[in-house]
Image (cartoon, rainbow, N blue to C red):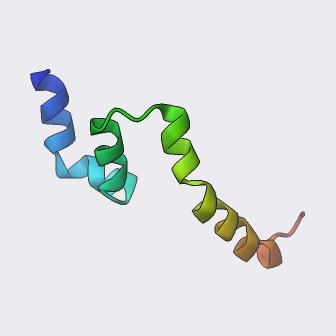
Amino acid sequence: TAQQESFFNKEAFDKLAGTTKLKEQIEQGLSFAEIKETWQNDLAAFKKIREKYLIYP
């Protein structure tokens, strides 16, 4: 719809998401589960890095 196009064309969406990748995945019709799966490698790397900084493991 025109409203959806207007929402995704705003630069703010990409800034909030931190990348254009999320918008592209939504536009491609990926499901939430498929999008979430694409985050797993980066999430695992983040969790490994943060381990030494946790006060309560």
Q: Position of residue 13 (x, y in %)?
A: 28, 47
Name which quarter of the figure residue 50 lies in.
Answer: bottom right
As displayed, is residue 31 above or below residue 54? Answer: above
As displayed, is residue 49 above or below residue 39? Answer: below
Seen from the viewer's position, the closer of residues 40 and 5 is: 40
Q: Is residue 16 left or right of residue 57?
A: left
Q: Residue furthest right?
A: 57
Q: Is residue 8 left or right of residue 39?
A: left
Q: Position of residue 35 (x, y in %)?
A: 48, 43
Q: Residue furthest left?
A: 2
Q: Position of residue 2 (x, y in %)?
A: 9, 24
Residue shown at the point (28%, 53%) measured from the top left: 14
Q: Is residue 26 left or right of residue 53?
A: left
Seen from the viewer's position, the closer of residues 28 and 7 is: 28
Residue shown at the point (78%, 76%) measured from the top left: 53
Quarter of the picture containing the N terminus is: top left
Seen from the viewer's position, the closer of residues 20 and 51 is: 20
Name which quarter of the figure residue 43 lies in.
Answer: bottom right
Residue shown at the point (35%, 44%) measured from the top left: 25
Q: Position of residue 41 (x, y in %)?
A: 61, 62
In this rendering, the count of numbered labels is 0
Q: Is residue 45 left or right of residue 27?
A: right
Residue shown at the point (55%, 43%) measured from the top left: 36
Quarter of the picture containing the C terminus is: bottom right
